Amino acid sequence: MKHIAAYLLLQVGGNSSPSAADIKKVLGAVGIEADDERLDKLISELEGKSINELIAEGNSKLASVPSGGAVAASGSGGGAAPAATAEEAKEEKKEEEKEESDDDMGFGLFD
């Protein structure tokens, strides 16, 4: 990711075809050592390609990926399970209230 980020920064800065040396210089400016093998692979794969087209292609691929929310699991453990979870929730709430009162140290943020 750091190599791609440096490549894109150079492109935004006006360098339409950044070299490995350019990317190493950007990374070196912030104290990051470049991995030569990965850098060479990145340069060879991006050579002659338009970043804008690659980003547009990636966006179209991501649009087809489902990104729905998590599915809730249904519990069929019997009648005792809801009562147990209700008790646990009450205990947790009491503990949270106790912790909150301990944290204010005698003054509030907006007092």
Image (cartoon, helix red, strand yellow):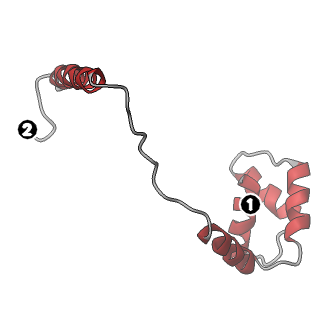
Front residue of 2/87: it is 87
Residue drawn at x 53%, y 60% is 67
Residue drawn at x 46%, y 49% is 70
Q: Which residue is mark 2?
A: 111
Quarter of the figure that contains the N terminus: bottom right
Report the side of 1 relative to 24 (left or right). left
Front residue of 31/44: it is 44
Question: What is the three-letter code of the residue carrying label 2?
Answer: Asp
Question: What is the three-letter code of the residue carrying label 1?
Answer: Ile
Is residue 13 visible to the viewer in this orientation of the structure? no
In this view, 99 is above or below 52: above
The answer to which image quadrant residue 63 occupies is: bottom right
Q: Which residue is mark 1?
A: 4
Badge 2 marks a residue whose secondary structure is loop
Instruction: Tell me residue 60's x, y (percent).
Output: 65, 75
> Can you tell which mark lies on residue 53?
none
Report the side of 83 relative to 65 (left or right). left
Badge 1 marks a residue whose secondary structure is helix
Report the side of 35 relative to 96 (left or right). right
Crowding near pointer 1: few (<14 within 10 Å), some, many (20+)?
some
Front residue of 78/5: it is 78
Front residue of 102/95: it is 95
- Gap between marks 2 and 1 measured at Cα: 48 Å
Q: How many marks?
A: 2
